[in-house]
Image (cartoon, helix red, strand yellow):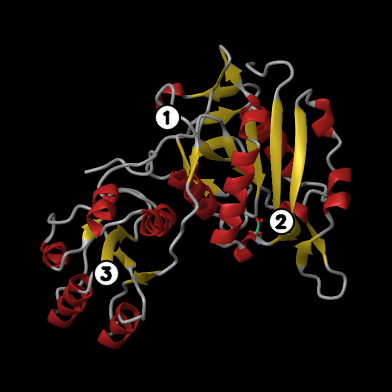
Amino acid sequence: MAVEKESSVLLLFTGGTISMSEDPSTGALRPIDFDRLQEYMPEIKQTGIRVKSVPFLPLIDSSDVDPSAWERMAMLIEENYEDFDGFVVLHGTDTMAYSASALSFMLENLSKPVIFTGAQLPIGMMRSDAKENLLTAIEIASAKENGQPIVPEVCIFFEDTLFRGNRTTKKNAEHFSAFNSYNYPPLAKAGVHIKYFRSSIHYPAAGTKLRVRTHIDQNIAILKLFPGITEHTVNAILQIPGLKAVVLESFGAGNAPRKTWFHNALKDATDRGILIVNKSQCSTGSVEMGRYETSLNLMSAGVMSGYDCTTEAIVTKLMYLLGECDSQDAIKHQLSVSMCGEMTGS
Ligand code: ASP
């Protein structure tokens, strides 16, 4: 195995089920004290890897994560970038795919591993998946070959699989295998050995320097179509004051109703400068605008393709681009290309 002596990992502890116990009065899971949590993890010392933990206090359920938490994670990684071989982010599973996607855009020219993980059962419980996930994530974050990190990407490690973070979606609230990457192969599989699939891993160009970008614009919405959606509902979303972009969750290969009012509502929104990105409600496959007549309408209304991106990746990419880019042309260009492996492309 490629873990070298003196490896070091910074553990950003944000919360999630991994850090929770049952509240005796309500029976609901809630985060416990960070100090108590550390008592459950003596194995970290036995890895031979120098692990420093930074808790985000108070620890939170990931449903409470917002862009300010992403900024904090990104800044901590930047401040500690030279001192550690890699980073592990312990995070609730519910919004982990959003945070991993956001960080993939915010950490430009990343050349070290940032591995998100968590657990489906709290770390203190008998059958918890926490320790295995955490210990393997630490090993992956510190893994090197010829002195170079093996996985210099923002990833999610869960159960036995390492995924590219911005390709991942939470798929299961019950099983230990909680995530999948429907449109991109895994980056590694952990069994007796950790097997890395190097041809799927992105390696940055030599000599590039980490640049952390933290401007995020939250003025976006998701419009999920369903048969029978009313003009009133569509307009209520497209008329939100200050709205700058919409993720349109369409049917199949990117199709939508051909009704005149629907086309007019979208066209009116794009004419007002609102970006609309087409994302299929299917998990696997890509938007193919123009394949069916039911998507020609979208093209003529100025809707852009989201190709095979996840909703999590499009939402965070839009927030990032709206915060960082000066012009709509620049945003449109970036939406049509893969910035850090988030889509297979046109
Ligand atoms: N509600 C928890 C969270 O996302 C679920 C988990 O961690 O698995 O914080």
| Residue shown at the point (40%, 69%) measured from the top left | 219
Q: Which residue is mark 2?
A: 17
Q: Which residue is mark 1?
A: 202
Taking the view exactly as shown, the residue that stands out farthest to the top is: 146
Q: Which residue is mark 3?
A: 274
Task: State the CA–CA distance, disc 1 to disc 2.
Answer: 30 Å
Mark 2 closeness class: few <14, some 14–19, many ≥20 residues within 10 Å: many
Task: State the CA–CA distance, disc 2 to disc 3.
Answer: 37 Å
The answer to which quarter of the image holds residue 304 is bottom left
Type of the residue with mark 3: Ile
Looking at the rendered image, the disc whose residue lies closer to the viewer, 1 or 2, is 1
Give the SS element for disc 3: loop
Figure quadrant of the N terminus: top right
Give the SS element for disc 2: helix
Of the pair 130 and 68, the residue shown nearer to us: 68
How far across and down, in percent of the image, does residue 156 sit? 56, 42
- Classify mark 2 as within 8 Å of ligand 1 or not, answering yes or no: yes
